[in-house]
Image (cartoon, grey):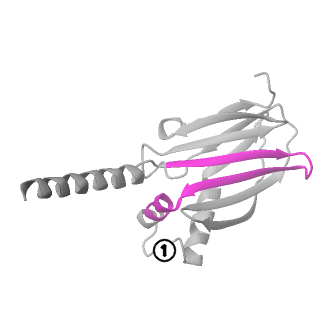
């Protein structure tokens, strides 16, 4: 009987630890794709649905279920657009247009685009969910001409612009 109780307790601890670990990852993945065919810089933001829901609930009273509530989805979409900024090497703002958003499985996606800027580097900021979770990391992958460069922006970094050279060799 004691062994059975101990085994049950261990399984409960393992299950709880795994569940809480999964909810504490606090990461978003953002992709910037230079699409030469369309002449557009395509931006995709991917958030864990759980993080987005809990973050929005802490910021906005009465926020609904992000997986099904269209008004709440629009609120998070608008929030993400205010948190991501891009500039050229000459500090000219890159005007990102909203494209849309969707729930796909356990993820919430936000899509934006801009005309491909004439610049040799990008300056980027992404502070989504940093005001709520100091451990939030926003990973940005920039893809151009077959190469990929990556940035990681955390709360301690979000006050300054992160610069990425747009050439394969840098």
Q: Nearer the viewer, residue 12 or 93?
A: 12
Q: Quadrant of the N terminus?
A: bottom left
From which residue to which does the magenta span run? 27-55
Residue at point 53%, 62% (across, down): 106
Q: Position of residue 110 (x, y in %)?
A: 66, 60
Q: Nearer the viewer, residue 158 or 46?
A: 46
Q: Quadrant of residue 55?
A: bottom left
Task: Say if residue 8 shows up in the picture.
Answer: yes
Q: Quadrant of the C terminus?
A: top right
Vertical arrangement, residue 87 with respect to residue 69, above or below: above
Q: Residues within 10 Å of mark 1 (few under 14, many from 20)?
A: some
Residue at point 82%, 44% (across, down): 34
Q: Position of residue 107 (x, y in %)?
A: 57, 60
Residue at point 62%, 64% (across, down): 77
Q: Quadrant of residue 5?
A: bottom left
Residue at point 50%, 61% (across, down): 52
Asked if residue 139 lies in the magenta stretch, the reply is no
Q: Which residue is mark 1?
A: 65
On screen, residue 9 versus residue 141, left or right, reads: left
Asked if residue 30 lies in the magenta stretch, the reply is yes
| Secondary-structure class at tag 1 | loop
| Main secondary structure found in the magenta portion | strand
Q: Position of residue 95 (x, y in %)?
A: 78, 52
């Amino acid at each position: 009987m004691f062994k059975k109780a101990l085994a049950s307790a261990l399984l409960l601890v393992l299950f709880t630890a795994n569940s809480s670990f999964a909810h504490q990852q606090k990461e978003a993945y953002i992709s910037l794709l230079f699409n030469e065919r369309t002449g557009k810089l395509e931006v995709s933001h991917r958030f864990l649905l759980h993080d987005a829901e809990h973050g929005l609930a802490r910021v906005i009273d009465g926020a609904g279920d992000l997986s099904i509530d269209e008004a709440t989805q629009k609120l998070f979409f608008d929030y993400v657009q205010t948190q991501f900024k891009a500039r050229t090497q000459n500090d000219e703002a890159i005007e990102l247009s909203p494209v849309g958003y969707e729930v796909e499985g356990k993820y919430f996606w936000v899509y934006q685009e801009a005309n491909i800027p004439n610049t040799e580097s990008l300056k980027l900021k992404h502070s989504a969910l940093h005001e709520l979770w100091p451990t939030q990391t926003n990973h940005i992958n920039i893809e151009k001409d077959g190469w990929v460069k990556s940035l990681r922006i955390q709360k301690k970094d979000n006050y300054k612009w992160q610069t990425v050279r747009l050439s394969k060799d840098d």
